[in-house]
Amino acid sequence: MSLREALLRCFQNEPDRIFGIQDLCQVVQKYYEFTPFQFELDPRHPQPRYEHEVRSQTNRLRRDGYISRLSRNQYRYSPNKDTTP
């Protein structure tokens, strides 16, 4: 399962929950196993690489209409699209 599919599953399993990026980083590990490389700190940013990947995939899901951005760092499942990416 890809990270994108795992994130979408998180939103689909809890459609009323409002997620932040940190929440998603924790919950997605039920469905997706990060590699040791993803746990390394990014040399340009003081955060693990997986946080950037989760943020990037979240923005792609939002752009494609699977989730809605409520405000800064608040995302919720958007039932407009029920198909998987």
Image: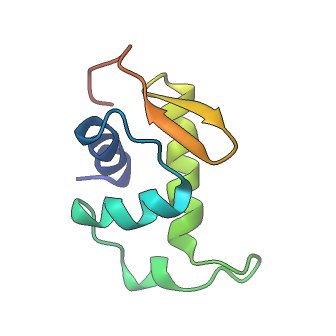
Residue 17, located in which quarter of the rendered image?
A: top left
**Nearer to me, 31 or 77:** 77
**Nearer to me, 51 or 15:** 15
Residue 31, located in which quarter of the rendered image?
A: bottom left
From this view, report whether residue 11 is shown above or below residue 54. Answer: above
- Which residue is painted at 55% across and 66% down in the image? 51
From this view, report whether residue 1 is shown above or below residue 72. Answer: below
- Which residue is painted at 33% across and 31% down in the image? 85
**Nearer to me, 61 or 72:** 72
- Residue lying at the far right in this picture: please name it: 44
> Where is residue 30 drawn, in percent x and y?
23, 64
Q: Taking 47 as reference, is 20 left or right?
A: left
- Which residue is painted at 38% across and 46% down in the image? 4
**Nearer to me, 3 or 23:** 23
- Which residue is painted at 77% across and 77% down in the image? 44
Q: How is the image coloured?
A: rainbow
> Where is residue 84 drawn, in percent x and y?
27, 29
Total numbered circles:
0
> Where is residue 28 drawn, in percent x and y?
33, 59
> Where is residue 42 drawn, in percent x and y?
65, 79
From this view, report whether residue 18 is shown above or below residue 29. Answer: above
- Residue lying at the far top in this picture: please name it: 80
Q: Taking 66 as reference, is 44 left or right?
A: right
Q: Taking 50 as reference, is 79 left or right?
A: left
